[in-house]
Amino acid sequence: MYFNTAIFYDIENLLKGYSFSQQMADNLSLRDILADIRDTSRLGHIALQRAYANWSDHRLKLLRGQINELGIEPVQVLGFSQDPKKNAADIQLAIDAIDIAHIRPALSVYVIISGDGGFASLAKKLHEYGKTVIGCAYRNATNRVFQAVCDDFVWITDPDEADRPERTLPGDLTSPRPQVNDPRNVRLTKVVKRLSSQETEAVLAKTHEVLQWYAAEHHHDLSRQGIVLSVVQEALNFLIPEFQPARYGFPKFIEYLQYACTGTPLCVVRPASGQVHLSLRNGGRGGAEVLPDLQARDLHSPEGYRAVLAAGTGPLRLPPGPELSIILRWLVEHPRSGVDVGTIYEEAEAQLGSLLPPDSVKAALMSLIWAEAFERTPEGAPLSDQQLTLRPELNSVAALTHHLRSAARRKLTRSLAVVREAVLEEVIPLVE
């Protein structure tokens, strides 16, 4: 087994500085980032992972659970919240990377998870040592020079999207629109009209219209290097209001596109190196893997409901029923009053760690918060600054279950015309 990869997480950059919201920290998924990086196919086995932050910051309590589970070494950087300068984590990360390049020459792939332009110099130096450098960051928060000098670059979903309020009317075009940056999409949006509906058939038809435009206008790109999926997603985010693949039964955008490509001249391809992209079916492959077309999924299924509930603002990422009932019972038996979210999580993880994975504890706790099962004070303050008290009327597992199910029903109703109670009961079983 060949361990050749080192991964460095600039948490300060991922959270966009010091004044990040608790919700953004809670929505940041290092596991999803790691999965996106693996899609480049450049990684071997991971020998080292380090994450740089002021880990004593109480807003990072839930994130600490993630790094422990993923085997990421936390590197304490006090300047993250105390020093007005924003480069404390950057400097330590760069020093460590160069040091490791000298003392561990077998590590040949360096992944830098940050969009900071200062890492362009680090990437160039690592190239001098014969290393491959992969960058990873948010599309709208990436220095172009750093992106250009990397051997590959992975775009990741911005967790701050979940902080944006939902529109009450899907067709309200007066709200701020997502922006397009890719030159191809700039031209596309001048000829393809924006959708005013979120109905499944209309969304799929608009997706096919976009795919047809790419096929007609960028046939050469599609037959050669392809078009990376982040470009296609950028176009759909702009043209389809509140576009969320999970609303159509596909938790991941790549799966939605595999479904949308069915019966078209296009397909989704994972190359031996580089990012997954959209390609012509009869284009050159060069050893790349053609991902299979996917059939439509029944939204009225436990998997479909879970996908819809996990999408968008106020995500309800529910663990399996038996695990959920354990956490609900623990909350009822240990009602918390006037404590912060990190303390509740740490206490639950400490007492339930032998029964449940940390992710299930976090998922249930955050779902209950978004479902307003807790009174939060002071009102209007960020979650990180609030004290939580379990609502007194939710003093039984049955009451908590009914409350969570009601919140789930409301969210499902916003995306589906009809909610089937039997399916909802499978997702959130009633425990007396």
Image (cartoon, rainbow, N blue to C red):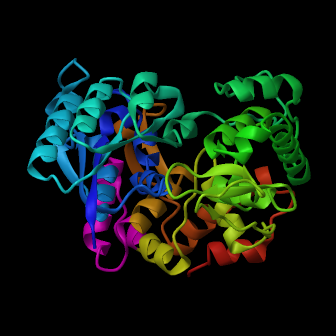
The vertical placement of 289 against 136, above or below, is below
Residue 99 position, x and y percent, is 11, 41
Viewer-proximal residue, 310 or 221?
221
> What are the residue bounds of the magenta stretch?
330-358
Q: Is residue 15 visible?
A: no
Q: Residue furthest top?
A: 84
Viewer-proximal residue, 272 or 194?
272
- 131 sits left or right of 389 in the view: left
The vertical placement of 170 against 202, above or below, is above
The vertical placement of 421 against 54, above or below, is below
Residue that appears at 29% across and 73% down: 353
Residue 101 position, x and y percent, is 16, 45
Residue that appears at 73% across and 47% down: 223
Q: Quadrant of the C terminus?
A: bottom right
Quadrant of res 218: top right
Residue that appears at 87% across and 43% down: 212
- 371 sits left or right of 189 in the view: left
